[in-house]
Image (spheres, rainbow, N blue to C red):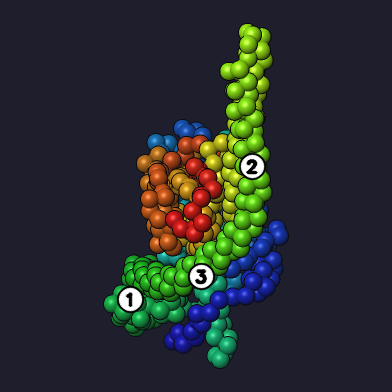
Amino acid sequence: MEFRKTLKYVGLSVGLLTAVATASYGRPTQVVSSDGVIVTRRDAMAIRYSEGQNSWVDMSGTRLAPDLTGKAEVKRQQGRTRVKLEMKNFGNPQGLGPFYTTYVLWAISPEGHADNLGEMPFKSNPNIEVTTSLQTFALIITAEPYSAVKLPSPVVVAENQMRPGTKGVPEATKIQYRGDTGTFYTVSTDEPSMAADYNTPLVVLGARRAVEVAKHAGARKYDEEDLHKAEIKLAVLEQTWPDSHKAEEKLGGLAREIMQLSEHAREVSVDRENQARLEAERRAARGAIADSRSEAEQSRSDAAQAQAQAAEAQSQAAQAQDEAARAKQETERARERVQEAQTEADKAKANEELARDQAEQSRIEADRARSDKEAAEQQLYLSLSAILETKKEARGLVVSLSDVLFDFNKATLKPGARERLSKLAGILIAYPGPYRLEIDGFTDSVGTEEYNLKLSQDRAGTVQSYLTEAGVHSDRIGQVKGMGKMMPVATNDTAEGRQMNRRVEIVISDLMPSPNPTGQQ
Protein backbone atom coordinates (compact mmCIF):
# COMPACT_ATOMS: atom_id res chain seq x y z
CA MET A 1 0.00 0.00 0.00
CA GLU A 2 1.49 3.34 -1.01
CA PHE A 3 2.10 5.67 1.92
CA ARG A 4 0.26 8.90 1.11
CA LYS A 5 -0.69 10.19 4.53
CA THR A 6 1.47 13.00 5.88
CA LEU A 7 2.41 14.32 9.29
CA LYS A 8 1.81 18.00 9.94
CA TYR A 9 4.72 19.78 11.63
CA VAL A 10 2.76 21.70 14.23
CA GLY A 11 3.05 21.78 18.02
CA LEU A 12 0.54 20.01 20.22
CA SER A 13 -1.36 22.01 22.81
CA VAL A 14 -0.71 21.32 26.48
CA GLY A 15 -4.28 20.21 27.02
CA LEU A 16 -4.21 17.65 24.19
CA LEU A 17 -0.90 16.14 25.34
CA THR A 18 -2.10 15.95 28.93
CA ALA A 19 -5.27 14.20 27.86
CA VAL A 20 -3.34 11.67 25.75
CA ALA A 21 -0.87 10.97 28.53
CA THR A 22 -3.54 10.61 31.22
CA ALA A 23 -5.49 8.19 29.08
CA SER A 24 -2.37 6.16 28.33
CA TYR A 25 -0.62 5.76 31.68
CA GLY A 26 -1.67 4.10 34.88
CA ARG A 27 -0.25 6.87 37.06
CA PRO A 28 -1.00 10.63 36.87
CA THR A 29 1.24 12.25 34.26
CA GLN A 30 1.65 15.89 33.21
CA VAL A 31 3.08 16.72 29.79
CA VAL A 32 3.86 20.36 28.96
CA SER A 33 5.56 22.11 26.05
CA SER A 34 9.00 23.60 26.78
CA ASP A 35 11.57 25.01 24.31
CA GLY A 36 10.34 22.92 21.40
CA VAL A 37 10.42 19.58 23.26
CA ILE A 38 8.06 17.72 25.53
CA VAL A 39 8.84 17.66 29.26
CA THR A 40 7.19 14.59 30.79
CA ARG A 41 6.71 14.25 34.53
CA ARG A 42 5.64 10.85 35.80
CA ASP A 43 6.31 8.37 38.58
CA ALA A 44 9.34 6.23 37.80
CA MET A 45 11.97 4.44 39.87
CA ALA A 46 15.55 5.57 39.21
CA ILE A 47 18.02 3.12 40.78
CA ARG A 48 21.70 3.62 41.65
CA TYR A 49 23.53 0.33 40.92
CA SER A 50 26.60 -0.66 42.96
CA GLU A 51 29.92 -1.29 41.23
CA GLY A 52 30.67 -4.95 40.54
CA GLN A 53 27.33 -6.39 41.71
CA ASN A 54 24.65 -8.23 39.74
CA SER A 55 21.08 -7.09 40.36
CA TRP A 56 17.60 -7.89 39.02
CA VAL A 57 14.61 -5.60 38.46
CA ASP A 58 11.10 -6.30 37.15
CA MET A 59 9.55 -4.63 34.11
CA SER A 60 5.81 -3.89 34.42
CA GLY A 61 3.38 -2.87 31.69
CA THR A 62 1.50 0.43 31.92
CA ARG A 63 -2.23 0.83 31.23
CA LEU A 64 -1.39 0.77 27.51
CA ALA A 65 0.03 -2.76 27.80
CA PRO A 66 -1.18 -4.29 31.09
CA ASP A 67 -0.16 -7.85 30.09
CA LEU A 68 3.43 -6.85 29.28
CA THR A 69 5.92 -8.28 31.79
CA GLY A 70 9.63 -8.88 31.98
CA LYS A 71 12.80 -8.78 34.01
CA ALA A 72 16.26 -7.25 33.58
CA GLU A 73 19.66 -8.32 34.88
CA VAL A 74 21.83 -5.25 35.58
CA LYS A 75 25.56 -5.16 36.35
CA ARG A 76 27.80 -2.10 36.80
CA GLN A 77 31.46 -2.77 35.99
CA GLN A 78 34.44 -0.64 34.89
CA GLY A 79 32.43 2.50 34.16
CA ARG A 80 29.68 0.78 32.08
CA THR A 81 26.35 -0.76 33.05
CA ARG A 82 25.23 -3.93 31.22
CA VAL A 83 21.49 -4.65 30.93
CA LYS A 84 20.09 -8.05 29.88
CA LEU A 85 16.34 -7.69 29.32
CA GLU A 86 13.73 -10.41 28.77
CA MET A 87 10.12 -9.43 27.96
CA LYS A 88 6.83 -11.29 27.39
CA ASN A 89 3.53 -10.51 25.63
CA PHE A 90 4.54 -7.67 23.28
CA GLY A 91 1.70 -6.65 20.96
CA ASN A 92 1.88 -5.09 17.50
CA PRO A 93 2.77 -1.38 17.97
CA GLN A 94 0.20 -0.49 15.28
CA GLY A 95 -2.40 -1.34 17.91
CA LEU A 96 -1.33 1.81 19.78
CA GLY A 97 -1.81 4.04 16.72
CA PRO A 98 -0.82 4.26 13.05
CA PHE A 99 2.41 6.17 13.76
CA TYR A 100 4.02 3.51 15.94
CA THR A 101 6.16 0.88 14.25
CA THR A 102 8.55 -0.28 16.98
CA TYR A 103 9.45 -0.30 20.66
CA VAL A 104 12.62 1.31 22.10
CA LEU A 105 14.35 0.66 25.45
CA TRP A 106 15.58 3.82 27.27
CA ALA A 107 17.72 4.61 30.32
CA ILE A 108 16.53 7.88 31.94
CA SER A 109 18.78 9.64 34.47
CA PRO A 110 17.25 11.60 37.42
CA GLU A 111 18.31 14.81 35.62
CA GLY A 112 16.25 13.81 32.57
CA HIS A 113 19.01 12.61 30.20
CA ALA A 114 17.58 9.95 27.87
CA ASP A 115 19.85 7.20 26.44
CA ASN A 116 18.41 5.15 23.53
CA LEU A 117 19.63 1.65 24.46
CA GLY A 118 18.20 -0.07 21.43
CA GLU A 119 15.16 -1.32 19.52
CA MET A 120 13.16 -4.18 21.03
CA PRO A 121 12.91 -7.08 18.53
CA PHE A 122 9.23 -7.41 17.56
CA LYS A 123 8.21 -10.85 18.68
CA SER A 124 6.11 -12.22 21.49
CA ASN A 125 8.99 -12.83 23.93
CA PRO A 126 11.96 -10.67 22.87
CA ASN A 127 15.25 -10.30 24.71
CA ILE A 128 18.04 -7.74 24.32
CA GLU A 129 21.51 -7.10 25.82
CA VAL A 130 22.80 -3.50 25.88
CA THR A 131 25.14 -1.19 27.85
CA THR A 132 25.01 2.41 29.09
CA SER A 133 27.45 4.80 30.74
CA LEU A 134 24.81 5.79 33.33
CA GLN A 135 25.03 4.39 36.85
CA THR A 136 21.72 5.77 38.15
CA PHE A 137 18.74 5.46 35.83
CA ALA A 138 15.19 4.27 35.25
CA LEU A 139 14.45 1.72 32.50
CA ILE A 140 11.37 2.44 30.35
CA ILE A 141 10.05 1.12 27.03
CA THR A 142 8.20 3.45 24.64
CA ALA A 143 6.37 3.05 21.36
CA GLU A 144 8.10 5.05 18.59
CA PRO A 145 7.54 5.91 14.89
CA TYR A 146 11.01 4.48 14.08
CA SER A 147 13.97 3.08 15.97
CA ALA A 148 16.58 5.83 15.36
CA VAL A 149 14.81 8.47 17.49
CA LYS A 150 17.05 10.41 19.90
CA LEU A 151 14.38 11.39 22.45
CA PRO A 152 11.51 9.26 23.84
CA SER A 153 7.85 9.71 23.02
CA PRO A 154 5.30 10.21 25.83
CA VAL A 155 3.82 6.76 25.06
CA VAL A 156 5.38 4.53 27.76
CA VAL A 157 4.36 0.86 27.65
CA ALA A 158 6.62 -0.56 30.41
CA GLU A 159 8.90 0.63 33.22
CA ASN A 160 11.18 -0.89 35.85
CA GLN A 161 10.16 -1.83 39.39
CA MET A 162 12.37 -2.93 42.29
CA ARG A 163 11.86 -6.54 43.40
CA PRO A 164 12.81 -8.28 46.67
CA GLY A 165 16.59 -8.58 46.73
CA THR A 166 17.30 -5.85 44.18
CA LYS A 167 20.84 -4.60 44.87
CA GLY A 168 20.44 -0.90 44.25
CA VAL A 169 19.50 2.35 45.96
CA PRO A 170 16.33 4.21 44.84
CA GLU A 171 17.52 7.65 43.70
CA ALA A 172 14.13 9.23 43.03
CA THR A 173 10.52 8.12 42.67
CA LYS A 174 9.45 11.11 40.59
CA ILE A 175 11.38 11.61 37.38
CA GLN A 176 11.25 14.24 34.66
CA TYR A 177 12.61 13.60 31.19
CA ARG A 178 12.72 15.52 27.94
CA GLY A 179 10.95 13.74 25.08
CA ASP A 180 10.62 14.61 21.42
CA THR A 181 7.80 16.84 20.17
CA GLY A 182 4.31 15.53 19.56
CA THR A 183 4.65 16.30 15.86
CA PHE A 184 5.43 12.61 15.25
CA TYR A 185 1.92 11.71 16.32
CA THR A 186 -0.49 14.07 14.52
CA VAL A 187 -2.20 13.87 11.12
CA SER A 188 -2.91 16.82 8.84
CA THR A 189 -6.48 18.00 9.39
CA ASP A 190 -7.11 18.33 5.64
CA GLU A 191 -6.51 14.64 4.89
CA PRO A 192 -8.37 11.46 5.90
CA SER A 193 -7.28 9.91 9.18
CA MET A 194 -4.45 7.42 8.84
CA ALA A 195 -5.45 3.85 9.62
CA ALA A 196 -3.30 1.16 11.19
CA ASP A 197 -1.46 -0.94 8.59
CA TYR A 198 -1.04 -4.60 9.52
CA ASN A 199 -0.01 -5.71 6.01
CA THR A 200 3.17 -3.69 5.44
CA PRO A 201 6.24 -4.91 7.37
CA LEU A 202 6.88 -2.72 10.41
CA VAL A 203 10.45 -2.00 9.37
CA VAL A 204 9.15 -0.55 6.07
CA LEU A 205 6.57 1.54 7.93
CA GLY A 206 9.37 2.84 10.18
CA ALA A 207 11.42 3.92 7.14
CA ARG A 208 8.39 5.79 5.78
CA ARG A 209 7.77 7.53 9.10
CA ALA A 210 11.43 8.59 9.36
CA VAL A 211 11.43 10.23 5.89
CA GLU A 212 8.13 12.04 6.54
CA VAL A 213 9.34 13.35 9.91
CA ALA A 214 12.56 14.65 8.30
CA LYS A 215 10.53 16.44 5.60
CA HIS A 216 8.31 18.18 8.12
CA ALA A 217 11.33 19.15 10.21
CA GLY A 218 12.50 21.22 7.21
CA ALA A 219 15.10 18.85 5.76
CA ARG A 220 14.13 19.92 2.23
CA LYS A 221 15.45 23.36 3.18
CA TYR A 222 18.26 22.54 5.62
CA ASP A 223 19.68 19.11 4.59
CA GLU A 224 18.55 18.34 1.05
CA GLU A 225 21.47 15.96 0.42
CA ASP A 226 20.71 13.46 3.20
CA LEU A 227 16.95 13.70 2.61
CA HIS A 228 17.41 12.97 -1.11
CA LYS A 229 19.55 9.92 -0.32
CA ALA A 230 16.90 8.65 2.10
CA GLU A 231 14.11 9.17 -0.45
CA ILE A 232 16.01 7.25 -3.16
CA LYS A 233 16.65 4.34 -0.79
CA LEU A 234 13.01 4.42 0.34
CA ALA A 235 11.86 4.16 -3.28
CA VAL A 236 14.05 1.07 -3.71
CA LEU A 237 12.64 -0.40 -0.49
CA GLU A 238 9.03 0.25 -1.56
CA GLN A 239 9.61 -1.55 -4.88
CA THR A 240 11.46 -4.47 -3.30
CA TRP A 241 9.58 -5.50 -0.18
CA PRO A 242 6.30 -6.80 -1.75
CA ASP A 243 8.33 -9.42 -3.65
CA SER A 244 10.64 -10.29 -0.76
CA HIS A 245 10.03 -13.28 1.48
CA LYS A 246 10.72 -12.42 5.14
CA ALA A 247 11.06 -8.72 4.33
CA GLU A 248 11.77 -7.85 7.97
CA GLU A 249 14.97 -9.92 7.93
CA LYS A 250 16.19 -9.29 4.39
CA LEU A 251 15.38 -5.57 4.10
CA GLY A 252 15.96 -4.52 7.71
CA GLY A 253 19.46 -3.21 7.00
CA LEU A 254 18.27 -0.95 4.15
CA ALA A 255 15.29 0.28 6.19
CA ARG A 256 17.47 1.18 9.17
CA GLU A 257 19.93 2.97 6.89
CA ILE A 258 16.98 5.08 5.69
CA MET A 259 16.03 5.78 9.32
CA GLN A 260 19.60 6.85 10.20
CA LEU A 261 19.83 9.18 7.17
CA SER A 262 16.41 10.66 7.90
CA GLU A 263 17.14 11.13 11.60
CA HIS A 264 20.42 12.87 10.77
CA ALA A 265 18.60 15.15 8.32
CA ARG A 266 15.98 15.88 10.99
CA GLU A 267 18.64 16.67 13.60
CA VAL A 268 20.52 18.96 11.22
CA SER A 269 17.27 20.72 10.29
CA VAL A 270 16.21 21.20 13.90
CA ASP A 271 19.68 22.47 14.82
CA ARG A 272 19.81 24.95 11.95
CA GLU A 273 16.28 26.12 12.59
CA ASN A 274 17.22 26.63 16.24
CA GLN A 275 20.29 28.59 15.14
CA ALA A 276 18.06 30.79 13.02
CA ARG A 277 15.75 31.24 15.99
CA LEU A 278 18.69 32.06 18.26
CA GLU A 279 19.94 34.63 15.76
CA ALA A 280 16.49 36.22 15.78
CA GLU A 281 16.60 36.19 19.57
CA ARG A 282 20.05 37.78 19.49
CA ARG A 283 18.68 40.57 17.31
CA ALA A 284 15.84 40.96 19.77
CA ALA A 285 18.37 40.92 22.61
CA ARG A 286 20.34 43.71 20.95
CA GLY A 287 17.09 45.64 20.84
CA ALA A 288 16.58 44.81 24.50
CA ILE A 289 20.09 46.12 25.23
CA ALA A 290 19.18 49.35 23.48
CA ASP A 291 16.05 49.48 25.63
CA SER A 292 18.15 48.80 28.71
CA ARG A 293 20.38 51.72 27.80
CA SER A 294 17.27 53.85 27.50
CA GLU A 295 16.31 52.57 30.91
CA ALA A 296 19.79 53.54 32.06
CA GLU A 297 19.16 57.06 30.78
CA GLN A 298 15.92 57.06 32.73
CA SER A 299 17.86 55.83 35.73
CA ARG A 300 20.25 58.73 35.31
CA SER A 301 17.27 61.07 35.16
CA ASP A 302 16.01 59.48 38.35
CA ALA A 303 19.51 59.93 39.74
CA ALA A 304 19.32 63.65 38.95
CA GLN A 305 16.09 63.81 40.90
CA ALA A 306 17.81 61.93 43.66
CA GLN A 307 20.64 64.48 43.54
CA ALA A 308 18.08 67.22 44.10
CA GLN A 309 16.97 65.34 47.14
CA ALA A 310 20.63 64.96 48.00
CA ALA A 311 20.97 68.76 47.91
CA GLU A 312 18.56 68.86 50.80
CA ALA A 313 20.65 66.26 52.51
CA GLN A 314 23.73 68.37 51.78
CA SER A 315 22.04 71.30 53.47
CA GLN A 316 21.55 69.13 56.48
CA ALA A 317 25.15 68.02 56.09
CA ALA A 318 26.18 71.69 56.05
CA GLN A 319 24.47 72.12 59.38
CA ALA A 320 26.37 69.09 60.60
CA GLN A 321 29.56 70.68 59.29
CA ASP A 322 28.68 73.87 61.20
CA GLU A 323 28.32 71.75 64.29
CA ALA A 324 31.65 70.15 63.51
CA ALA A 325 33.15 73.63 63.04
CA ARG A 326 31.78 74.71 66.38
CA ALA A 327 33.16 71.54 67.89
CA LYS A 328 36.50 72.40 66.30
CA GLN A 329 36.36 75.89 67.76
CA GLU A 330 35.63 74.39 71.14
CA THR A 331 38.61 72.12 70.56
CA GLU A 332 40.81 75.10 69.77
CA ARG A 333 39.60 76.89 72.85
CA ALA A 334 40.25 73.77 74.89
CA ARG A 335 43.76 73.65 73.43
CA GLU A 336 44.23 77.28 74.42
CA ARG A 337 43.02 76.47 77.89
CA VAL A 338 45.59 73.69 78.05
CA GLN A 339 48.28 76.16 77.10
CA GLU A 340 47.03 78.68 79.62
CA ALA A 341 46.65 76.18 82.45
CA GLN A 342 48.90 77.06 85.41
CA THR A 343 48.88 73.75 87.18
CA GLU A 344 49.39 70.12 86.15
CA ALA A 345 45.82 69.31 87.19
CA ASP A 346 44.36 72.04 84.95
CA LYS A 347 46.44 70.81 82.01
CA ALA A 348 45.23 67.19 82.52
CA LYS A 349 41.58 68.30 82.60
CA ALA A 350 42.00 70.45 79.50
CA ASN A 351 43.72 67.55 77.63
CA GLU A 352 40.83 65.23 78.58
CA GLU A 353 38.29 67.71 77.17
CA LEU A 354 40.36 68.05 73.98
CA ALA A 355 40.48 64.26 73.43
CA ARG A 356 36.72 64.01 74.07
CA ASP A 357 35.97 66.74 71.51
CA GLN A 358 38.26 65.14 68.89
CA ALA A 359 36.62 61.71 69.40
CA GLU A 360 33.16 63.23 68.97
CA GLN A 361 34.19 64.92 65.73
CA SER A 362 35.62 61.61 64.38
CA ARG A 363 32.43 59.76 65.35
CA ILE A 364 30.22 62.26 63.49
CA GLU A 365 32.32 61.93 60.32
CA ALA A 366 32.41 58.09 60.51
CA ASP A 367 28.63 57.88 61.05
CA ARG A 368 28.00 60.09 58.02
CA ALA A 369 30.29 57.98 55.77
CA ARG A 370 28.78 54.69 56.98
CA SER A 371 25.23 56.01 56.50
CA ASP A 372 25.99 57.09 52.91
CA LYS A 373 27.52 53.68 52.06
CA GLU A 374 24.67 51.67 53.60
CA ALA A 375 22.02 53.75 51.81
CA ALA A 376 23.71 53.31 48.41
CA GLU A 377 24.22 49.57 48.94
CA GLN A 378 20.60 49.07 50.13
CA GLN A 379 19.21 50.89 47.08
CA LEU A 380 21.33 48.71 44.76
CA TYR A 381 20.27 45.55 46.64
CA LEU A 382 16.56 46.41 46.27
CA SER A 383 16.96 47.13 42.54
CA LEU A 384 18.79 43.82 41.92
CA SER A 385 16.40 41.74 44.04
CA ALA A 386 13.50 42.85 41.83
CA ILE A 387 14.94 40.95 38.82
CA LEU A 388 17.25 38.18 40.17
CA GLU A 389 17.92 36.26 43.38
CA THR A 390 20.28 38.51 45.39
CA LYS A 391 21.90 37.95 48.78
CA LYS A 392 24.00 40.11 51.10
CA GLU A 393 27.21 38.38 52.12
CA ALA A 394 30.50 39.43 53.66
CA ARG A 395 32.12 39.47 50.20
CA GLY A 396 29.40 41.82 48.81
CA LEU A 397 26.07 41.52 47.00
CA VAL A 398 25.75 38.06 45.36
CA VAL A 399 23.42 37.80 42.32
CA SER A 400 22.62 34.18 41.34
CA LEU A 401 21.55 32.79 37.94
CA SER A 402 20.27 29.22 38.10
CA ASP A 403 20.98 26.66 35.36
CA VAL A 404 17.36 26.85 34.12
CA LEU A 405 18.41 30.14 32.46
CA PHE A 406 20.86 28.21 30.23
CA ASP A 407 20.26 25.61 27.52
CA PHE A 408 20.60 22.04 28.81
CA ASN A 409 24.30 21.12 29.33
CA LYS A 410 25.33 24.22 27.32
CA ALA A 411 26.54 27.77 27.99
CA THR A 412 23.88 29.37 25.76
CA LEU A 413 21.65 31.91 27.54
CA LYS A 414 17.88 31.47 27.20
CA PRO A 415 15.76 34.53 26.27
CA GLY A 416 14.61 34.97 29.88
CA ALA A 417 18.21 35.09 31.07
CA ARG A 418 19.19 37.67 28.45
CA GLU A 419 16.24 39.87 29.45
CA ARG A 420 17.25 39.74 33.13
CA LEU A 421 20.91 40.41 32.38
CA SER A 422 19.89 43.41 30.23
CA LYS A 423 18.02 44.87 33.23
CA LEU A 424 20.99 44.06 35.49
CA ALA A 425 23.30 45.91 33.09
CA GLY A 426 20.97 48.93 33.09
CA ILE A 427 21.06 49.07 36.90
CA LEU A 428 24.87 48.80 37.02
CA ILE A 429 25.31 51.48 34.32
CA ALA A 430 23.12 53.86 36.32
CA TYR A 431 24.88 53.19 39.66
CA PRO A 432 26.68 56.45 40.63
CA GLY A 433 29.60 54.98 42.56
CA PRO A 434 32.49 52.58 42.05
CA TYR A 435 32.01 48.82 42.21
CA ARG A 436 33.79 45.60 41.22
CA LEU A 437 32.32 42.44 39.63
CA GLU A 438 33.49 38.85 40.02
CA ILE A 439 31.68 36.15 37.96
CA ASP A 440 31.88 32.53 39.16
CA GLY A 441 30.35 29.45 37.46
CA PHE A 442 29.40 26.28 39.39
CA THR A 443 28.12 22.77 38.50
CA ASP A 444 26.87 19.73 40.39
CA SER A 445 29.05 16.66 41.05
CA VAL A 446 27.74 14.63 38.07
CA GLY A 447 30.29 14.17 35.27
CA THR A 448 34.05 14.44 35.14
CA GLU A 449 35.94 17.24 36.86
CA GLU A 450 37.39 18.43 33.52
CA TYR A 451 33.94 18.63 31.91
CA ASN A 452 32.42 20.48 34.89
CA LEU A 453 35.27 23.00 35.01
CA LYS A 454 34.90 23.77 31.28
CA LEU A 455 31.08 24.07 31.42
CA SER A 456 31.20 26.35 34.48
CA GLN A 457 33.96 28.50 32.88
CA ASP A 458 31.99 28.76 29.60
CA ARG A 459 28.81 29.84 31.43
CA ALA A 460 30.66 32.45 33.48
CA GLY A 461 32.33 33.73 30.27
CA THR A 462 28.94 33.95 28.53
CA VAL A 463 27.61 36.17 31.34
CA GLN A 464 30.74 38.38 31.18
CA SER A 465 30.41 38.80 27.38
CA TYR A 466 26.75 39.70 27.63
CA LEU A 467 27.28 42.32 30.35
CA THR A 468 30.12 44.04 28.47
CA GLU A 469 28.06 43.99 25.25
CA ALA A 470 25.22 45.60 27.21
CA GLY A 471 27.48 48.53 28.18
CA VAL A 472 29.11 47.55 31.50
CA HIS A 473 32.74 48.69 31.32
CA SER A 474 35.19 45.79 31.13
CA ASP A 475 37.43 47.40 33.76
CA ARG A 476 34.60 46.90 36.25
CA ILE A 477 34.88 43.10 35.83
CA GLY A 478 37.60 41.30 37.75
CA GLN A 479 37.96 37.55 37.89
CA VAL A 480 35.77 35.28 35.73
CA LYS A 481 36.20 31.73 37.01
CA GLY A 482 34.80 28.26 36.44
CA MET A 483 34.62 26.56 39.85
CA GLY A 484 33.20 23.23 38.64
CA LYS A 485 31.65 21.20 41.46
CA MET A 486 33.38 23.22 44.21
CA MET A 487 31.44 25.13 46.89
CA PRO A 488 28.03 23.34 46.62
CA VAL A 489 25.12 25.16 48.26
CA ALA A 490 23.05 21.97 48.60
CA THR A 491 23.50 18.20 48.67
CA ASN A 492 24.44 16.48 45.39
CA ASP A 493 22.55 13.33 46.48
CA THR A 494 19.19 14.58 45.12
CA ALA A 495 18.08 16.03 41.79
CA GLU A 496 16.77 19.16 43.58
CA GLY A 497 20.11 19.72 45.32
CA ARG A 498 22.09 19.23 42.10
CA GLN A 499 19.91 21.81 40.32
CA MET A 500 20.62 24.36 43.10
CA ASN A 501 24.36 23.72 42.71
CA ARG A 502 24.27 24.39 38.93
CA ARG A 503 24.48 28.22 38.93
CA VAL A 504 26.44 31.36 38.00
CA GLU A 505 27.11 33.93 40.76
CA ILE A 506 27.89 37.61 40.13
CA VAL A 507 29.61 39.12 43.20
CA ILE A 508 29.37 42.93 43.42
CA SER A 509 31.91 44.37 45.87
CA ASP A 510 33.88 47.56 46.69
CA LEU A 511 30.61 49.52 46.72
CA MET A 512 30.87 53.20 47.67
CA PRO A 513 28.66 56.17 46.81
CA SER A 514 30.50 58.45 44.40
CA PRO A 515 30.93 62.19 44.79
CA ASN A 516 30.65 62.35 40.98
CA PRO A 517 27.25 64.10 40.47
CA THR A 518 26.85 62.85 36.89
CA GLY A 519 26.81 59.18 37.87
CA GLN A 520 29.07 58.31 34.93
CA GLN A 521 31.20 55.18 35.05
Mark 1 nearby-residue class (10 Å; few <14, some 14–19, many ≥20): many
Residue shown at the point (47%, 48%) measured from the top left: 434
Q: CA distance from mark 2 to mark 1?
A: 79 Å
Name the foreground residue: 415 vs 291: 291
Where does the image place residue 149, in percent across and percent down from the top left?
45, 65
Disc 1 marks a residue whose amino acid type is Asp
> Which residue lies under the disc numbered 2?
322
Disc 3 marks a residue whose amino acid type is Ser
Residue shown at the point (65%, 18%) measured from the top left: 350
Q: CA distance from mark 2 to mark 3?
A: 41 Å
Q: Tell me, yes or no, whether the two marked residues, 2 and 1, touch with CB atoms within 8 Å.
A: no
> Which residue lies under the disc numbered 3?
294
> Which residue lies under the disc numbered 1?
223
Residue shown at the point (49%, 42%) measured from the top left: 510
Indicate which disc residue 391 carries.
none
Where does the image place residue 289, in percent across and percent down from the top left?
47, 67
Q: Tell me, yes or no, whether the two marked residues, 3 and 1, touch with CB atoms within 8 Å.
A: no
The mark that comes first in sequence, 2 or 3, is 3
Residue shown at the point (45%, 85%) measured from the top left: 3
**Disc nearest the viewer among 2 and 3:** 2
The mark that comes first in sequence, 2 or 1, is 1
Secondary structure at badge 2 equals helix
Q: Is 202 placed above or below 491 here?
A: below
Disc 2 marks a residue whose amino acid type is Asp
